[in-house]
Image (tube, rainbow, N blue to C red):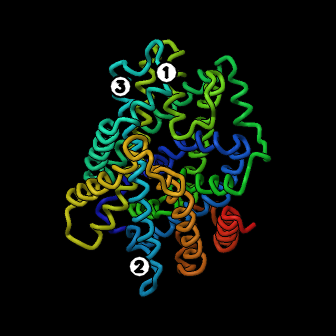
Amino acid sequence: MNNKTDQWTTKLGFILSSAGAAIGLGAIWKFPYMTGTNGGGAFFLVFIAFTLVIGLPILLSEFIIGRGSNKEAVSSYQSLAPGTPWAFIGHLGVAGAFLLMSFYSVVGGWVLIYSLLSLVGMVIQDGTNYEQLFAQITGSPAISILGLAAFMAINISVVSLGIKNGIEKSSKILMPLLFVFFIILVIRALTFEGAMEGLRFFLRPDFSQLSWESILYALGQSFFALAVGISVMVTYSSYLGKDVSLPMSAGSVSIMNIFVSLLAGLAVFPVVFAVGLEPTEGPGLLFMVLPEAFAQMLFGEVFLSLFLLLFLFAVLTSSFSMLEIITSAFTAKSERSRKKVAAVAGLIVFLAGIPAALSSSTLSDFLISGMTIFDATDFLVSNIILPVGCLLIALFIGYKMDKILVKQEFISSTTWAAGFYGTWYQLMRWVVPVTIIVVFLGSIGLF
């Protein structure tokens, strides 16, 4: 019996909240520009393969570890493997979530600013150059830091309320609306003159465009988009009762993630090619494409405002999960107030995020291995910390965690999944760790 006082009240609430944690910026913001800079359709296919064969099994593993221990990220590994160094996985997860949130919240601030500007009719205007608009917003230190601060304030407010009163309640209402508006945007994008060229770029694979680095990015994107490798899902599933099928939940989250990534590509690339933008524009791609697409629609400003607000919510559900893992780690073994810990953690993340927020302005010339602070932090988290975290989780569940408990959690509240247990377990023991190691070594030139 789960003895936590704060739990998910429904299966749907858990799945939608987990999907929200996974989807967010990973599928909607990052996926299009990563696909655009890494070969289009070939990258998309490799991403799907990694998501299903590597990401999905790891997501299920995190669910098993969290519910099997009934504890948050750090304590879960300590509980399941007492007296061993395996708790390092949880500590790495908390550190990874902190670093991830420090640059993620900068993008969240951009989304918030765009949302507010669209509400007062200042985004879609005649003659607006949307590339210049994005450059003006991100190039202003005051605007960037103000957006970061406001975004963190929202996170602190919701995470302070806990699981069922904060995260779950909002996810159950707004996640379905995001899907509806995304589909509307896709339908409009596909009607642009010249849209078929963008569609071919996204759906017709050209494997000559792939490099080992692109494959590493696809692996990192599959982890980033599912929010695995930093034990966020360990923390989320620790609030879960035994009446939920973990394989079904993991499968649902993974399929929703692929579906939203597909929608993002279908919404973005037809517009990119139709209006003459380059798919290699980078992190600002979505912010240049969205206004352009909605400007061509009847009542475009209204639809843009609604979509941006829903997109903002998707971004927030992901950031909630990151602040939650930090907050729960510091409240698990103490009498500290959740509200105070969330506030202090949020303030520290805000301060840590300032250099990334200034990467397009004051600190634009400060480079780390040729990358801005924003890009370097993204690379460190997505392509090093997440793969290492996923590798350690695979080794933990395949070689250290009690096999009886693993199987009990796998088959709990389900009958059909029992037949897949053996395949999944061997994937975690052999295929997942070997694949991560091979891709990582290939990306640094050893193959």
- Quarter of the picture holding the N terminus: bottom left
Specify the amino acid type for callout 1: Asn
Of labels 2 and 1, earlier in sequence is 2
Badge 1: residue crowd in 10 Å (few <14, some 14–19, many ≥20): some
* Closer mark to the observer between disc 2 and disc 1: 1
Q: Residue lying farthest bottom?
A: 83
For mark 2, what is the residue?
79
* Closer mark to the observer between disc 3 and disc 2: 3
Q: In this view, does 159 lie to the left or right of 306?
A: left
Q: In this view, does 170 lie above or below 308?
A: below
Q: Identify which residue is drawn at 29% across, 67% down.
A: 330
Q: Identify which residue is drawn at 47% across, 36% down.
A: 176
Q: Identify which residue is drawn at 66% across, 50% down.
A: 47
Q: Is residue 12 left or right of residue 149?
A: right
For mark 1, what is the residue?
129
Residue 350 place in picture, x, y as percent = 30, 51
Q: Is residue 422 above or below residue 177?
A: below
- Quarter of the picture holding the C terminus: bottom right
Residue 11 visible somewhere in the drawing = no
Q: Gap in Å between the C-alphas at discs 2 and 1?
A: 55 Å
Q: Residue lying farthest front?
A: 365
* Closer mark to the observer between disc 1 and disc 3: 1
For mark 3, what is the residue?
117
Badge 3: residue crowd in 10 Å (few <14, some 14–19, many ≥20): some
Residue 145 place in picture, x, y as percent = 31, 42
